[in-house]
Image (cartoon, rainbow, N blue to C red):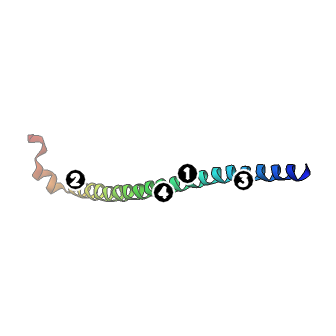
Amino acid sequence: MCSRSGANVEASLASLVRVFLCAFMCCVMDMNLCLQVTTLLLDKMRRIKNRMVRLKTRVETIRELLEKFLEDEGDMKSMNLTAM
């Protein structure tokens, strides 16, 4: 009887190991999927950030040009804004 219960314990433990191994593998697969998605999202965010930096540079350049233009009295007179 003792050897039979030992075999039952072994079979139960083997079954638990299979269940835990399956659960572990599911977690690993989910983690890998999240890492792939995160990598893709990070790459997309990097590209968006680069676009924003380029846009900011363009806006700052235009702002500086407008400030210089508006500070120049001759340019302001040549625009004749009151005639509009």
Q: Which residue ends up furthest to the left in the rendered image?
A: 83
For label 1, the residue is 30
In-front residue for pair 56/77: 56
**Which amino acid, mark 1?**
Asp
C-alpha separation, residue under disc 1 versus residue under disc 2: 58 Å
**Which amino acid, mark 4?**
Gln
**Which amino acid, mark 3?**
Val
Nearest to the eye among marks 2 and 4: give it: 4
In-front residue for pair 38/82: 38
For the residues bearing labels 2 and 4, Cβ distance under 8 angstroms: no
For label 2, the residue is 70
Q: Which residue ends up furthest to the right in the rendered image?
A: 2
**Which amino acid, mark 2?**
Leu
Label 4 Cα neighbours within 10 Å, binned few <14 / some 14-19 / many ≥20 = few
Q: Is residue 36 left or right of residue 64?
A: right
For the residues bearing labels 1 and 3, Cβ distance under 8 angstroms: no
Q: Return the x and y of residue 6 as percentages of the image width and height.
A: 86, 52
C-alpha separation, residue under disc 1 versus residue under disc 3: 20 Å
Label at residue 17: 3
- For image coordinates 13% across by 44% down, the residue present is 81
Nearest to the eye among marks 4 and 3: give it: 3
Label 2 Cα neighbours within 10 Å, binned few <14 / some 14-19 / many ≥20 = few
Question: Which numbered disc, 2 or 4, marks the residue that appears first in the sequence?
Answer: 4
Q: Return the x and y of residue 63 as percentages of the image width and height.
A: 28, 54
- For image coordinates 36% across by 58% down, the residue present is 53
For label 4, the residue is 36
C-alpha separation, residue under disc 2 versus residue under disc 4: 51 Å
